[in-house]
Amino acid sequence: MIMRTAILCAFIAVSGITAASAECEIGDAKLEEAVQQNPRFRGPTNSQYVRDLRNLRDAALTLRSYGRHEDCERLLANIRELIAGPPMGLLGDNDEEEADKQNAASEPKVKRGAATGTRNKKDAKPLLRIDELAPGLRTDEMIGSEVRSSDDKIVGEVRNIVFGTKDGRDYAVVASGGFFTTGKDSIVVPVRSLMISQDRGSFYLSITKEAMKAVPLMPDPDYNWLSDPTWRTRNDALFQKH
């Protein structure tokens, strides 16, 4: 009996080791090591390439968190191949129609002016300023979150966050699949002007849907507007008037 118990325990221990070793290990891709050691990953030319690789790495981490270790490993294998291969700028086809179709599939589908939310309910909790939150917000909690006007109509969703301007003004780039789409058809919202629901599910602007007509679109997708204090001051003032 003792011998059988010992054998069983040994089997369980070996099984546990096998299961543990089957888990997807994100660090095995050695992405950050490659970025530090390989000159072709550095510099503005391939900055988007590095961002794409990191996005893939984050996707692998998500798969791992859901126990999809085989899928995670397959994605890590793709990352390793991309690290070893030529830069992204040298890959892909030149079919513009196909590229437009693929880009459209990545656009947010929330429509501006969609159904009213729940702010009119009696039990609706007061909105908070972002600096009133404890703990504070992470950027991954902000990106992808819906944004609503003061009259509770959907404006779009947060697609990017800009921190670290010299004058201390941080911005959320808000886009939607309706009137506002990411890139040239986005709006720029001062982060300090955003309110947030207590469940952290939605951001709110201080202006109504109707007042949104006066808000200019983001002038360019390359963020050159960050170096234009006149444009930013005029844009920011629209959110401070209300």
Image: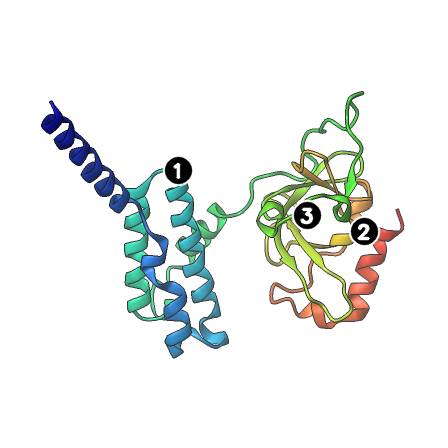
Numbered circle sitting on residue 66: 1
Task: Give the structural element (helix, strand or loop) at label 2.
Answer: helix
Q: Tell me which colouring the rendered structure shows.
A: rainbow
Mark 3 highlights which residue? 136
Query: Quadrant location of residue 71?
Result: top left
Locate residue 31, reporting x and y percent: 38, 63
Q: Residues within 10 Å of mark 1 (few under 14, many from 20)?
A: few
Task: Give the structural element (helix, strand or loop) at label 3.
Answer: loop
For the question of whether residue 162 can be seen, the reply is yes
Locate residue 226, reporting x and y percent: 70, 68
For the question of whether residue 89 can be seen, the reply is no
Residue 142 appears left or right of 91: right
Marks 3 and 2 in Cβ contact (< 8 Å): no
Mark 2 highlights which residue? 214
Locate residue 130, reporting x and y percent: 74, 47
Q: Amino acid at mark 2?
A: Ala
Give the vertical position of 128 relative to 4 (above or below): below
Marks 3 and 1 in Cβ contact (< 8 Å): no
Locate residue 204, reporting x and y percent: 75, 41
Task: Give the structural element (helix, strand or loop) at label 1.
Answer: loop
Q: Nearer the viewer, mark 3 or mark 2?
A: 3
Give the quadrant of the N terminus: top left
Q: Which residue is most to the top?
A: 122
Front-most of 129 and 23?
23
Q: Amino acid at mark 1?
A: Tyr
Front-most of 206 and 26?
26
Q: CA distance from mark 3 to mark 1?
A: 25 Å
Q: Sequence-wise, which precedes: disc 3 or disc 2?
A: 3
